[in-house]
Amino acid sequence: MEDVAPKAETRILQHRHLLGLSTYSADEIQLILSTAREFREVLERPIKRVPTLLGTTIANLFFEPSTRTRISFELAAKRLSADLINFGGSGSSLSKGESLRDTVQNIEAMKVDMVVIRHSSPGAAHFLTRCIKARVINAGDGAHEHPTQALLDLLTISERYESFSGLRVSIIGDIAHSRVARSNIFALTTLGAEVTVCGPSTLMPLHTESLGVRVVHNLDEALHGCDVAIALRIQRERLGASLVPSMREYHATYGLNGRHMAMHPDMIVLHPGPVNRGVELDDEVADHERTAILDQVINGVAVRMAVIYLLAPGADE
Ligand code: CP
Protein backbone atom coordinates (compact mmCIF):
# COMPACT_ATOMS: atom_id res chain seq x y z
CA MET A 1 0.00 0.00 0.00
CA GLU A 2 1.38 3.37 -0.93
CA ASP A 3 0.47 4.96 2.41
CA VAL A 4 2.47 2.44 4.42
CA ALA A 5 5.93 3.43 5.61
CA PRO A 6 7.45 0.75 7.89
CA LYS A 7 8.83 2.06 11.17
CA ALA A 8 10.90 0.38 13.86
CA GLU A 9 9.12 2.01 16.81
CA THR A 10 5.96 0.19 17.93
CA ARG A 11 4.36 3.30 19.45
CA ILE A 12 3.78 4.79 16.02
CA LEU A 13 1.42 3.85 13.23
CA GLN A 14 2.74 2.21 10.10
CA HIS A 15 0.29 4.23 7.98
CA ARG A 16 0.35 7.90 6.94
CA HIS A 17 -3.44 7.96 6.47
CA LEU A 18 -6.55 6.26 7.85
CA LEU A 19 -8.45 5.21 4.74
CA GLY A 20 -9.84 1.97 6.12
CA LEU A 21 -9.04 -0.81 8.55
CA SER A 22 -8.46 -3.66 6.11
CA THR A 23 -4.70 -2.96 6.09
CA TYR A 24 -4.30 -2.01 9.75
CA SER A 25 -2.59 -4.62 11.95
CA ALA A 26 -3.76 -5.76 15.38
CA ASP A 27 -0.88 -3.78 16.94
CA GLU A 28 -1.92 -0.58 15.15
CA ILE A 29 -5.57 -0.98 16.17
CA GLN A 30 -4.57 -1.66 19.78
CA LEU A 31 -2.29 1.40 19.72
CA ILE A 32 -5.21 3.60 18.62
CA LEU A 33 -7.43 2.10 21.35
CA SER A 34 -4.86 2.54 24.12
CA THR A 35 -4.19 6.13 23.01
CA ALA A 36 -7.95 6.79 22.93
CA ARG A 37 -8.25 5.53 26.52
CA GLU A 38 -5.72 8.16 27.58
CA PHE A 39 -7.69 10.89 25.78
CA ARG A 40 -10.95 9.53 27.23
CA GLU A 41 -9.55 10.50 30.64
CA VAL A 42 -8.82 14.04 29.37
CA LEU A 43 -12.50 14.36 28.43
CA GLU A 44 -13.48 13.87 32.09
CA ARG A 45 -11.34 16.80 33.27
CA PRO A 46 -12.84 20.22 34.06
CA ILE A 47 -10.61 21.67 31.31
CA LYS A 48 -10.96 19.17 28.47
CA ARG A 49 -8.07 20.43 26.36
CA VAL A 50 -4.41 19.57 25.90
CA PRO A 51 -1.88 21.68 23.94
CA THR A 52 -0.60 18.68 21.97
CA LEU A 53 -1.40 19.87 18.44
CA LEU A 54 -0.94 23.63 18.74
CA GLY A 55 -0.01 24.85 15.26
CA THR A 56 -1.60 21.92 13.39
CA THR A 57 -4.41 22.82 11.00
CA ILE A 58 -7.18 20.36 10.11
CA ALA A 59 -9.87 20.67 7.42
CA ASN A 60 -13.16 18.86 8.07
CA LEU A 61 -14.67 18.23 4.61
CA PHE A 62 -18.19 16.80 4.81
CA PHE A 63 -19.98 16.27 1.51
CA GLU A 64 -22.68 14.06 3.11
CA PRO A 65 -24.90 14.77 6.12
CA SER A 66 -23.45 13.94 9.53
CA THR A 67 -24.12 14.77 13.16
CA ARG A 68 -21.91 12.52 15.31
CA THR A 69 -18.86 12.17 13.07
CA ARG A 70 -18.56 15.80 12.01
CA ILE A 71 -19.09 17.23 15.49
CA SER A 72 -16.78 14.72 17.16
CA PHE A 73 -13.96 15.33 14.68
CA GLU A 74 -14.42 19.06 15.32
CA LEU A 75 -14.38 18.57 19.10
CA ALA A 76 -11.42 16.17 18.86
CA ALA A 77 -9.37 18.74 16.95
CA LYS A 78 -10.30 21.50 19.40
CA ARG A 79 -9.55 19.33 22.46
CA LEU A 80 -6.05 18.83 20.98
CA SER A 81 -5.67 22.62 20.43
CA ALA A 82 -5.47 22.25 16.64
CA ASP A 83 -6.95 24.87 14.31
CA LEU A 84 -9.99 23.59 12.43
CA ILE A 85 -11.94 24.64 9.38
CA ASN A 86 -15.31 23.12 8.52
CA PHE A 87 -16.18 22.82 4.85
CA GLY A 88 -19.36 21.48 3.25
CA GLY A 89 -20.30 21.19 -0.41
CA SER A 90 -23.19 23.66 -0.32
CA GLY A 91 -22.25 27.32 -0.45
CA SER A 92 -18.80 26.53 -1.85
CA SER A 93 -17.33 26.91 -5.33
CA LEU A 94 -18.12 23.23 -6.00
CA SER A 95 -21.54 24.58 -7.02
CA LYS A 96 -19.74 26.61 -9.73
CA GLY A 97 -18.23 23.44 -11.15
CA GLU A 98 -14.88 23.32 -9.34
CA SER A 99 -13.60 19.75 -9.10
CA LEU A 100 -12.89 17.90 -5.84
CA ARG A 101 -9.18 17.77 -6.77
CA ASP A 102 -8.95 21.54 -7.34
CA THR A 103 -10.99 22.20 -4.20
CA VAL A 104 -8.75 20.18 -1.89
CA GLN A 105 -5.54 21.42 -3.52
CA ASN A 106 -6.68 25.01 -2.91
CA ILE A 107 -7.56 24.20 0.70
CA GLU A 108 -4.17 22.53 1.22
CA ALA A 109 -2.41 25.57 -0.27
CA MET A 110 -3.64 27.50 2.79
CA LYS A 111 -1.23 25.34 4.85
CA VAL A 112 -3.64 22.66 5.99
CA ASP A 113 -1.85 19.63 7.54
CA MET A 114 -4.66 17.07 7.77
CA VAL A 115 -7.93 16.49 5.94
CA VAL A 116 -10.97 14.61 7.23
CA ILE A 117 -13.39 13.66 4.47
CA ARG A 118 -16.88 12.19 4.27
CA HIS A 119 -18.09 11.58 0.75
CA SER A 120 -20.71 9.46 -1.02
CA SER A 121 -18.13 7.95 -3.40
CA PRO A 122 -16.24 4.83 -2.27
CA GLY A 123 -12.54 5.62 -2.62
CA ALA A 124 -12.91 9.39 -2.20
CA ALA A 125 -10.46 9.43 0.73
CA HIS A 126 -7.96 7.33 -1.19
CA PHE A 127 -8.32 9.70 -4.16
CA LEU A 128 -7.32 12.64 -1.96
CA THR A 129 -4.03 10.94 -1.04
CA ARG A 130 -3.11 11.16 -4.72
CA CYS A 131 -3.98 14.88 -4.94
CA ILE A 132 -2.46 16.35 -1.76
CA LYS A 133 0.40 15.78 0.68
CA ALA A 134 -1.72 16.31 3.81
CA ARG A 135 -2.65 13.33 5.96
CA VAL A 136 -6.12 12.00 5.10
CA ILE A 137 -8.70 10.48 7.46
CA ASN A 138 -11.74 8.74 6.02
CA ALA A 139 -14.93 9.77 7.84
CA GLY A 140 -17.07 7.48 5.65
CA ASP A 141 -16.87 6.91 1.90
CA GLY A 142 -20.01 5.51 0.30
CA ALA A 143 -20.50 1.85 1.22
CA HIS A 144 -16.73 1.29 1.50
CA GLU A 145 -15.42 2.01 5.03
CA HIS A 146 -16.06 4.11 8.15
CA PRO A 147 -12.93 3.27 10.14
CA THR A 148 -13.32 5.66 13.07
CA GLN A 149 -16.84 4.33 13.70
CA ALA A 150 -15.47 0.79 14.00
CA LEU A 151 -12.66 2.01 16.27
CA LEU A 152 -15.10 3.72 18.62
CA ASP A 153 -17.24 0.57 18.60
CA LEU A 154 -14.16 -1.43 19.59
CA LEU A 155 -13.30 1.03 22.36
CA THR A 156 -16.85 0.73 23.70
CA ILE A 157 -16.76 -3.08 23.56
CA SER A 158 -13.37 -3.10 25.33
CA GLU A 159 -14.93 -1.25 28.27
CA ARG A 160 -17.20 -4.29 28.84
CA TYR A 161 -15.03 -7.21 27.73
CA GLU A 162 -11.37 -7.84 28.51
CA SER A 163 -10.41 -9.42 25.21
CA PHE A 164 -11.58 -9.56 21.61
CA SER A 165 -10.21 -13.05 21.18
CA GLY A 166 -13.16 -15.42 20.82
CA LEU A 167 -15.68 -12.63 21.50
CA ARG A 168 -18.92 -13.38 19.63
CA VAL A 169 -20.15 -10.31 17.78
CA SER A 170 -23.23 -10.27 15.56
CA ILE A 171 -23.72 -7.47 13.04
CA ILE A 172 -27.38 -7.19 12.05
CA GLY A 173 -29.11 -5.45 9.17
CA ASP A 174 -28.17 -3.88 5.88
CA ILE A 175 -24.72 -5.40 5.36
CA ALA A 176 -24.66 -4.55 1.65
CA HIS A 177 -24.76 -0.78 2.05
CA SER A 178 -22.90 -0.55 5.35
CA ARG A 179 -19.42 0.93 5.57
CA VAL A 180 -19.74 0.47 9.34
CA ALA A 181 -20.18 -3.29 8.87
CA ARG A 182 -17.15 -3.54 6.59
CA SER A 183 -14.82 -1.62 8.92
CA ASN A 184 -16.07 -3.57 11.94
CA ILE A 185 -15.59 -6.89 10.15
CA PHE A 186 -11.98 -5.99 9.26
CA ALA A 187 -11.10 -4.75 12.75
CA LEU A 188 -12.92 -7.40 14.78
CA THR A 189 -11.59 -10.35 12.79
CA THR A 190 -8.06 -8.88 12.96
CA LEU A 191 -8.37 -8.86 16.76
CA GLY A 192 -9.66 -12.44 16.88
CA ALA A 193 -13.39 -11.96 17.41
CA GLU A 194 -15.90 -14.43 15.95
CA VAL A 195 -18.13 -12.31 13.72
CA THR A 196 -21.60 -13.29 12.47
CA VAL A 197 -23.47 -11.12 10.00
CA CYS A 198 -27.24 -11.35 9.76
CA GLY A 199 -29.76 -9.76 7.43
CA PRO A 200 -32.12 -10.37 4.55
CA SER A 201 -30.50 -11.93 1.49
CA THR A 202 -31.36 -8.79 -0.50
CA LEU A 203 -29.07 -6.80 1.84
CA MET A 204 -26.26 -9.39 2.01
CA PRO A 205 -23.45 -9.06 -0.55
CA LEU A 206 -22.36 -12.20 -2.40
CA HIS A 207 -19.30 -13.96 -0.98
CA THR A 208 -19.54 -12.23 2.41
CA GLU A 209 -18.09 -15.41 3.98
CA SER A 210 -14.80 -14.63 2.22
CA LEU A 211 -14.33 -11.82 4.77
CA GLY A 212 -13.94 -14.47 7.48
CA VAL A 213 -17.44 -14.17 8.97
CA ARG A 214 -20.42 -16.49 9.45
CA VAL A 215 -23.51 -15.50 7.46
CA VAL A 216 -27.02 -16.22 8.76
CA HIS A 217 -30.44 -14.89 7.84
CA ASN A 218 -32.29 -15.72 11.06
CA LEU A 219 -32.06 -13.24 13.93
CA ASP A 220 -32.47 -15.81 16.73
CA GLU A 221 -29.60 -17.79 15.23
CA ALA A 222 -27.44 -14.65 15.15
CA LEU A 223 -28.20 -13.82 18.79
CA HIS A 224 -27.63 -17.33 20.13
CA GLY A 225 -24.49 -17.12 22.33
CA CYS A 226 -23.88 -13.54 21.21
CA ASP A 227 -21.83 -11.18 23.44
CA VAL A 228 -22.25 -8.02 21.37
CA ALA A 229 -25.01 -7.19 18.89
CA ILE A 230 -24.32 -4.32 16.49
CA ALA A 231 -27.57 -3.19 14.87
CA LEU A 232 -27.01 -1.27 11.63
CA ARG A 233 -29.07 1.65 10.45
CA ILE A 234 -31.41 0.94 7.56
CA GLN A 235 -30.07 3.39 5.00
CA ARG A 236 -33.22 4.58 3.29
CA GLU A 237 -31.12 6.97 1.17
CA ARG A 238 -29.14 4.08 -0.35
CA LEU A 239 -31.89 1.39 -0.50
CA GLY A 240 -33.62 0.45 -3.73
CA ALA A 241 -37.38 0.40 -3.30
CA SER A 242 -37.71 -3.39 -3.49
CA LEU A 243 -34.88 -4.53 -1.19
CA VAL A 244 -37.02 -4.50 1.97
CA PRO A 245 -40.82 -5.08 1.75
CA SER A 246 -41.59 -2.52 4.47
CA MET A 247 -40.02 -1.03 7.59
CA ARG A 248 -42.71 -2.75 9.70
CA GLU A 249 -41.77 -6.15 8.23
CA TYR A 250 -38.04 -5.43 8.63
CA HIS A 251 -38.59 -4.65 12.33
CA ALA A 252 -40.64 -7.82 12.82
CA THR A 253 -37.85 -9.95 11.30
CA TYR A 254 -34.58 -8.17 12.16
CA GLY A 255 -35.45 -5.49 14.73
CA LEU A 256 -34.21 -5.92 18.31
CA ASN A 257 -36.90 -5.76 21.01
CA GLY A 258 -37.29 -6.21 24.77
CA ARG A 259 -37.77 -9.98 24.36
CA HIS A 260 -34.29 -10.26 22.84
CA MET A 261 -32.76 -8.32 25.75
CA ALA A 262 -34.51 -10.60 28.27
CA MET A 263 -33.47 -13.77 26.42
CA HIS A 264 -29.81 -12.67 26.27
CA PRO A 265 -29.12 -11.11 29.70
CA ASP A 266 -25.36 -10.67 29.16
CA MET A 267 -25.53 -9.27 25.64
CA ILE A 268 -24.76 -5.60 24.97
CA VAL A 269 -26.16 -3.67 22.01
CA LEU A 270 -24.40 -1.08 19.86
CA HIS A 271 -25.81 1.09 17.07
CA PRO A 272 -23.79 3.65 15.07
CA GLY A 273 -26.70 6.11 14.87
CA PRO A 274 -28.82 7.74 13.79
CA VAL A 275 -31.33 5.18 15.11
CA ASN A 276 -34.59 4.59 13.27
CA ARG A 277 -36.64 3.82 16.38
CA GLY A 278 -39.17 1.08 15.71
CA VAL A 279 -37.08 -0.23 12.80
CA GLU A 280 -33.63 -1.47 13.95
CA LEU A 281 -34.41 -1.05 17.68
CA ASP A 282 -37.64 -0.57 19.54
CA ASP A 283 -37.73 2.11 22.24
CA GLU A 284 -37.08 -0.39 25.05
CA VAL A 285 -33.82 -1.50 23.42
CA ALA A 286 -32.72 1.98 22.32
CA ASP A 287 -33.00 3.20 25.93
CA HIS A 288 -31.85 -0.02 27.63
CA GLU A 289 -28.99 0.08 30.17
CA ARG A 290 -27.13 -2.56 28.12
CA THR A 291 -27.41 -0.46 24.97
CA ALA A 292 -24.23 1.60 24.68
CA ILE A 293 -25.19 4.26 22.12
CA LEU A 294 -24.22 7.31 24.17
CA ASP A 295 -20.99 5.64 25.33
CA GLN A 296 -20.18 5.10 21.66
CA VAL A 297 -20.70 8.81 21.04
CA ILE A 298 -18.31 10.04 23.77
CA ASN A 299 -15.81 7.36 22.80
CA GLY A 300 -16.01 8.74 19.28
CA VAL A 301 -14.39 11.98 20.45
CA ALA A 302 -11.58 10.08 22.22
CA VAL A 303 -10.94 7.78 19.25
CA ARG A 304 -10.82 10.69 16.82
CA MET A 305 -8.40 12.54 19.13
CA ALA A 306 -6.22 9.43 19.08
CA VAL A 307 -6.34 9.05 15.30
CA ILE A 308 -5.58 12.73 14.69
CA TYR A 309 -2.75 12.66 17.26
CA LEU A 310 -1.15 9.49 15.88
CA LEU A 311 -1.38 10.60 12.24
CA ALA A 312 -0.42 14.24 12.74
CA PRO A 313 2.70 15.33 10.85
CA GLY A 314 5.65 14.88 13.17
CA ALA A 315 4.02 12.06 15.18
CA ASP A 316 6.20 9.53 13.34
CA GLU A 317 9.47 11.43 13.81
N1 CP B 1 -22.43 7.08 12.97
C1 CP B 1 -22.36 8.11 12.12
O1 CP B 1 -21.54 8.11 11.19
O2 CP B 1 -23.26 9.11 12.37
P1 CP B 1 -23.34 10.48 11.57
O3 CP B 1 -23.79 10.14 10.17
O4 CP B 1 -24.34 11.33 12.30
O5 CP B 1 -21.97 11.08 11.52
Image (cartoon, rainbow, N blue to C red):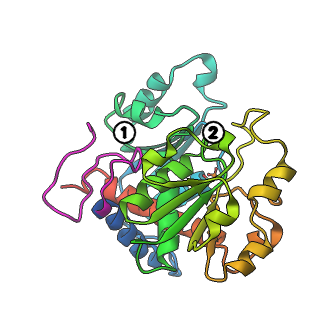
Q: Can you see residue 81?
A: no
Q: Which residues are magenta?
A: 1-26
Pick whichever, 66 or 251, lies toward us.
251
Question: Looking at the picture, does residue 125 appear above or below residue 82?
Answer: above
User: Based on the displayed image, in which of its 4 quarters is residue 280 positioned?
Assistant: bottom right
Q: Earlier in the sequence, mark 1 or mark 2?
A: 2
Is 277 left, or right, of 309 in this rendering?
Answer: right
Residue at mark 2: 64
Question: Looking at the picture, does residue 278 appear above or below residue 49?
Answer: above
**Amino acid found under the numbered disc labelled 2:** Glu
Is the C-beta separation of discs 1 and 2 under 8 Å?
Answer: no
**Amino acid found under the numbered disc labelled 1:** Lys
Give the position of the C terminus as an image quadrant.
Answer: bottom left
Pick whichever, 95 or 215, lies toward us.
215
Q: Is mark 2 within 8 Å of ligand 1?
A: yes
Label ID, residue 111: 1
Q: Residues within 10 Å of mark 1 (few under 14, many from 20)?
A: few
Q: Tell me the chief SS of the magenta region.
A: loop
- Residue 95 spot, x, y in % from top left: 64, 22
